[in-house]
Amino acid sequence: MKFILTTCFILFSLVLFSQENYTISGTVKDFSNGELVFGASVFLEGTSNGSITNAYGFYSITAPQGSYNIVVSYLGYVTEKKAVILDENQNIIFELKEDTTALDEVVITAEESEKANIRDPQMSVAVIKSTTIKQIPAVLGEVDLVKSIQLLPGVTNNGEGSNGFNVRGGAVDQNLVLLDEAIIFNESHLFGFFSVFNADVVKDIKLYKGNIPANYGGRVSSVLDIRQKDGNSKGFELNGGIGLISSRLAAEGPMFKNKGSFILAGRSSYAHLFLKLANQDNTAYFYDFNAKGNYEVDQKNRLYLSGYFGRDVLNFDDSFSNSYGNSTFNLRWNHIFNDKLFSNLSFIYGTYNYQLQLGFIGLDWTSSINNFNTKYDLKYYLNNKTTIDFGLSSIYYNFNPGDVKPLDDESAINENILDKKRALETGIYGQIEHKFSDKFNVQVGLRISMFNRLGGQSISTYLNDQPVVYNDELGIYEEGERTGEIEYAKNDRIANFSNIEPRLGLAYQLNETSSVKLGFSRVAQYLHLLSNTANATPLDVWTPSGSFIDPQMANQYSAGYFKDLHGGRFSIESEVYYKTVDNRIDYIDGSNLIANNYIETQILQGQSRAYGLEFLFRKNKGKFTGWLAYTLSKSEQQTLGGSAGGPGINKGDWYNTPFDRTHDISVTGSYLLTKKWSLSGNFIFQTGRPVTYPVGQYEYEGLSIANYDSRNANRLPAYNRLDFGATYKPNRKPQAKWKGEWVFSLYNVYNRKNAASISFGQNLETGANEATRTAIFGIVPSVTYNFKF
């Protein structure tokens, strides 16, 4: 803390000695459609004065009076250069044209320019362009953002048919996923087969795996920040795709006499229609809708309105029905106070709701999460060496853990409406980035977070304040004895927490092509995902910290070496990291989480740690582009008995988390064969996911009972897969309005039956325990026709 305050004082003191300067500010846009460009490099040639455009295309550069050439560059665009005489403050808008001579190169890069990658103190961040995602072969032919980021080092999943992604050994709930700043609680369609993000409307994606900037909070593993396109402000455009399983359509164009623009997009799967034709009553489909509009009030004010709605529907005869989805709404106001100060005010609403019906037991269960988020972010370009980010946010949560009702009159289910839970999470942050020299850059941030568990419900009390107790005779954990309840009114506070979260990033440039970086971040997470399965399914329940559940606290340390080779044609990125998480929950054996009003009786809190080495080698230019990613890592947890007594889980020893993958290798490439044909492919190898197997069995009253090993002491077989894709662009005239392409893909080329799970049960005929291996996909061919008009 003292270090941060001292650094801030030094940085502000530097301003007192600055000479008279002038400022160039403005925005950078795409020439063809007017989209604001995020991450463009704007600098004064021959100097160290420069800036990177923010999420809304704004830049600001301050320099002494004189004559300069201002240079604007961005990956895949022609570099613009403009001579300026800096004798007063100026506002300059740049429009970049696509580089048509670049042979349609596809590049994935950890930063938008090579220089930014070397000099920027921000590390452990990956940026993916939507054009890259569209080149990667995907299951069932659907472009998938989440599966694309899983090809990066440090990012894995829990196997085919699983939701979400895991970052540096963390759980799915430890990722903050944002779509235009709105929180997405479940980023998967059809239990992970598809992503909820439509690549046709995505402008840019940033994944922070560590050293998370101070403007983000609430999750301890990563932040996935996704921004939607603003829409074409220069002309109407229609694009989409028709596939075997799903189709999509997007329309965009100008509004308000070219002072604004809009984009509308929708997707839907229709595989269930083939089941109907085969006289099957099963149904499994999804649909989603994206919308965004903006209006330029004047040169200093712009309004944005965006939203998302998605839904999944699954029905299997009359025995099982499941429906779930996300909805978001965001109103934003960009305001430029002056040529140095930029602000963004957002009002955000989000909801995630789900329903389960089990016909064979007559169960009807619904649950939801609603959140209202107000945030105000400001960026101040102090001078050519220092920028300051600061702001605040407040999120109100309303949790409905579940309404349980009988499905019909014959059901034996009793109606049970679980207690609603409310909470308020607030945060205030400040972050300074300062260039001490041409070689040494520093980023110092501080976030102060506060969390209030609000009243409006009753909280159980337990004997000796122990919701979980250890039974010495049976050697198991059991529910504690409830002694009463405390009733809290809505204006009461059940529990409150506050935390100081410092962030630090250092970058030292060894020479023009290489640098070393150090990073540290401390992050608090106040929400917990309750799930006793390895995969996050729509049946999982989110719960806030409170009287018996403390917030998760993570410290992550990282160091990296970055190098460009042969003028940026190749690059190497390597990082090591060490992460600890306190108050990480795990579940007692035989825990019951669904429709349980006393969740605290089913869990223990422990600590986890993850550490590893990440390596990324990329080829960035030429007809062949791609990367090789390798991760060597360890993720484990220790859960002691604590106040509950007993040895804890796994006798108090460290054990593998379900997200531990020792080795993770991915190779991805794209080759421009001719003007008509391009080829792509990827290969993945991962150490098998940790599971718990039985190590023996015994008989009891004629039944064969399995005796299980220590928790997560075993593993599924290693996962590996090869995918291949080809894109064909027919001959077309340069001025033709209709542009189409055929995309062919083979998922799992050599038809490997990777184990999604191995379950154990008793054979009803022989009475013996048997293992059943479940594989979801073999080889999957697909074809999609994409068009643009």
Image (cartoon, rainbow, N blue to C red):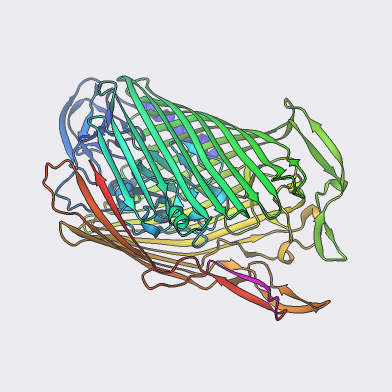
* Visible residue check, residue 216: no
Q: Nearer the viewer, residue 399 or 84?
A: 399
Where in the figure is residue 187, as x and y percent of width and height? 49, 47
Quarter of the picture containing the C terminus is top left
Q: Residue at x 33, y 42 (%)?
A: 249
Q: Considering only vertical position in the picture, is 107 above or below 445?
A: below
Residue 621 falls in image quadrant: bottom left
Q: Nearer the viewer, residue 532 or 346?
A: 532
Q: Say left or right for 51 vs 586.
A: left
Where in the figure is residue 19, as x and y percent of width and height? 30, 25
Q: Considering only vertical position in the picture, is 588 above or below 501?
A: below
* Visible residue check, residue 583: yes
**Region rendered in magenta:** 756-765
Residue 83 falls in image quadrant: top left
Q: Say left or right for 430 vs 353.
A: left
Where in the figure is residue 215, as x and y percent of width and height? 48, 36
Q: Residue at x 35, y 43 (%)?
A: 204
